[in-house]
Image (spheres, grey):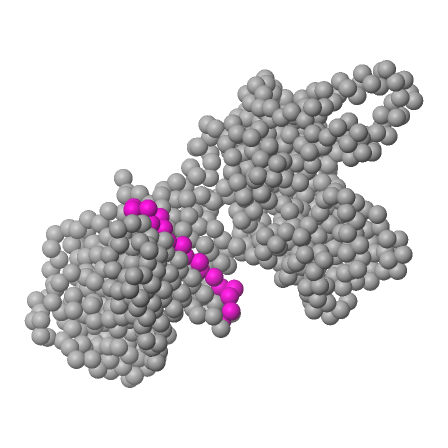
Amino acid sequence: MKQVVQNYKSGELALLDVPVPGCKPGGVLVRSAYSLISTGTELMKVSEAGMSMLGKARSRPDQVAKVMQSVATNGVPATYRKVMGKLDSWTPLGYSLCGVVEQVGSGIDDVKVGDVVACAGNEHALHAELNWVPKNLYTPVPDGLAPRHAAFGTVGSIALQGVRRGESQLGDVALVIGLGLIGQLVVQLLAASGVRVVGVDPDPARCELAARLGAAACGDPASAAVEAAVAELTGGHGVDQVYLAAGGDSNQPVELAVRLSRDRGRVVDIGKCRLDLPWNAYYMKELDVRFSRSYGPGRYDPEYELEGRDYPIGYVRWTERRNLACFLDLHARGRIDVEPLISHIADFDDAVETYQRLKDGDLKAVAVLFRYPGHTEHTAEAQAPEVAVPEVRRGGAVSTRNRSATAPVRLAFVGAGNYATSMLLPHLARRDGVELSTVVTTTALSGVNAQRKFGFTAASTDLDAALGDPSVDAVFVVTRHSSHAELTRKALLAGKAVFVEKPLALDQGELAGVLAAVEESGNDRLQVGFNRRFAPLLQEARKRFGARSGPASLRYLINAGRLDNGSWYLQQNTEGSRFAGEGGHFIDTASWLLGADPVSVYAVATSGNEDLQVVLRYPDGSTATLSYVTTGSSDFPKETLDLIADGKVLRLDDFVRASVHGRKRWNSPRLAKARDKGQRAELDAFLTAVRTGGPMPVPLESLVATTAATFAVRAALAAGAPVTLAAAR
């Protein structure tokens, strides 16, 4: 097998062929899928190895002291031979990985061959194709967590132990100094704990990243903005905890810590920085200085790490292994997110070159992963490589009521909530050629209110009676998301044309049920409420943009805003996620503008899955990036879109103004009236199709592809990798 090693005397790095370790009792043999380079600890070790002997001595005075003791005990010649022998040897690198159990040693009963585990330890979770890992240094990976994310388990445990040492409480304010890999994780863990965080780092990019991941404010250590943010958040008292996650020889971190701490605050050292404490300043504030020792209790205890002797949970709640499991659980539940930290993924065969690029500064990175060969069946990409786009199969011709093209279109509404009564029914009430026949609701009073306001002939709570009414031409399904698919299925089987608000379905099973009804009945008369493609302003802008010859880039920002507490949209267990409910709107708009359905989907989310970045790829190489955010300002427009191709740019500003830039420039007049997002035009197209028997406004195949793409967003978030949209086999 291959393993990354370094000669500490010469600094040489190599990828060596070494024997496979044996599977000893009390542990498991793990084949690596991903291992993480600690860009702090490991690069420091790599850099030290490249120093002169004098430089090495200066960087490790603790080791020099040991050498001097050995000289006093064993003499110079023996000590020299011992030191040179140790320096001129290959030493391993790495301490955080995820892999697959290949062999189980005796005494192990919590995992089996084939299980995915996260592993820790600078002697057991090495950058190697195979590692033997003792019981207390591995933990099973939760279902749905991508292996490349689980590879962060060890560094996540280091950050988690540091946060535990700080004993933060809800409402605290913390300062994190150093926003490298550990610092970024500390920021997320604190934010997930209800702590407001101020981050400090001289690198603006790292500050920006920490702000995206939950920090309330970030800045350069010399910036007055940091002190101002601390003063504002703490009322001038200073932060409750300081977490030192920085490295280097500067004493600036400990000096900044005391300056911005409150009286009797806590300072937790997680990284390896200079600790020349200003005695008077620390004394006057009576600061509690604490050290966080690596992954947690059990670290450096051979009986715990090597012999598997656990500490009773009643005495030691959070051990090394329990910290590891806790971090993975937090990630699996969306409380933290390591995906934005991944700067680069390198093939394991390129390990030496990758280290050299990091050392030389050619590769700027927060986190770098090695991806190992031969494990595609276990990697994140293989856990959810595809989402099927079901084939639309139409059965025999549906028997529908013979109707005159001049007769009014009779409509039944199932549901009369806010959207139906504000966005659909006002366009239909008292419209020529339309008759509102029956409104069906679960509560009698809501139906009566809709009947009185919009002129329905009848109000009812009996769905079957409405579907069985032969005079009804079309049924509108405007209910909660969880009922859309089943109601649509029933209406199709009843031979009705159906207009269903988005989403059509919340999962593959629901979508399959709808398509089975189409096949059984032969009735494909279906429209989903994807109205934006019908917006007059966007229609005109697309016409002005014209045809394109090359691939396009589309950027769509949806500033969705936060929902009010109590909104049924928040009932994700029954109604699906917010994006599952309305994301089809934006995917459909992008696909219509690009003239095709997507072939792959990639998605990442911020901590807590509040904000999404979705990248859609299309057959001709075009891409669409949807930024679905809930944390923006309500003063900013809700939807902005840019389409770029062939030297032209189409710009849409919240359905109020549009422009096209190219050889000929076009600017729309600013709309004086309310935004028109296409509801009226969509209803016109649907009613025309019902009245004339012509094709539905959007092909059913496109509706299905868009719905499948929303499923793929969920799958991509779980897998941490692009998901292919493939025809069902």
Q: Give the range drawn in magenta.
A: 617-634
Q: Is residue 168 above or below residue 567?
A: above
Location of residue 208 in the rendering, given as x and y in whole percent from the top left corner: 58, 56
Most foreground residue, 588 or 89: 89
Most foreground residue, 161 or 218: 218
Tell me the quadrant of the picture where the C terminus can be found: top left
Q: In this view, does 110 lie above or below 149?
A: above
Location of residue 449 in the rendering, given as x and y in whole percent from the top left corner: 32, 82
Tell me the quadrant of the picture where the N terminus can be found: top right
> Can you see residue 476?
no
Labels in figure, total: 0
Q: Extreme bottom residue here?
A: 452
Q: Extreme front residue here?
A: 663
> Can you see residue 288?
yes
Most foreground residue, 14 or 564: 14
Q: In this view, does 109 lie above or below 687?
A: above
Residue 621 is a magenta residue: yes
Q: Residue at horizontal 65%, vertical 25%?
A: 12
Occupied quadrant, residue 666: bottom left
Residue 475 is a magenta residue: no
Q: Residue at horizontal 25%, vertical 60%?
A: 546
